[in-house]
Amino acid sequence: MKLVVQIPCFNEQDTILEVLKNIPKKIKGIDEIKIFLIDDGSFDKTSQIAKDFGVDKIIRFNKNRGLSFAF
C-alpha cells in the first residue's frame, strides 16, 4: 500500500523543513510513502526548501488560490 502525504502551503519557509522532517520514513503496513507539496503561490523559499529536502512532487501555483483549491 502507498501513502501520499499532501502538504498545501503558503509562505512557510520558516516551518516547512520541520514539518518535512517529522513525516515518518516508514509506517508498518505501508510499502511506500510519497510527499507532495502544493505551493499555493508562495513568494518565499518554501518550494526550494522542499526541493532541497527531496520532496517527491512539487505543484506550484503562480498566485495564491486558497486552501480548498490547493487540495
Image (spheres, rainbow, N blue to C red):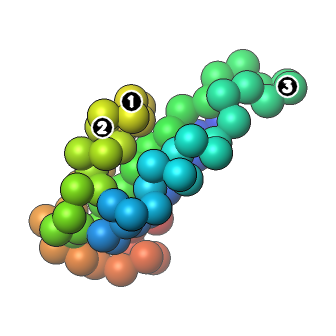
- Of residue 34 and residue 48, the one placed in the foreground of this image is 48
In the picture of the structure, the residue carrying the numbered disc 1 is 54
Please, is residue 36 above or below residue 41 in the view? above
Q: Are marks 3 and 2 in contact (CB under 8 Å)?
A: no
- Of residue 29 and residue 13, the one placed in the foreground of this image is 13
Kindly report which numbered mark, 3 or 1, lies closer to the viewer in this rendering.
Answer: 1
Q: Using the rendered view, name the quadrant where residue 9 is placed.
A: bottom left
In the picture of the structure, the residue carrying the numbered disc 3 is 29
Q: Are marks 2 and 1 in contact (CB under 8 Å)?
A: yes
Q: Is residue 12 left or right of residue 30?
A: left
Number of disc labels: 3
Q: Position of residue 66 (x, y in %)?
A: 36, 80
Please, is residue 20 above or below residue 14 in the view? above
The amino acid on which the numbered mark 3 sits, given as a three-letter code, is Gly
Q: Position of residue 70 (x, y in %)?
A: 39, 67
Sequence-wise first label, 3 or 1: 3
In the picture of the structure, the residue carrying the numbered disc 2 is 51
The amino acid on which the numbered mark 1 sits, given as a three-letter code, is Gly
Q: Which quadrant is home to the N terminus?
A: top right
- In the image, what residue occupies the spot 46% across and 61% down? 15
The amino acid on which the numbered mark 2 sits, given as a three-letter code, is Lys
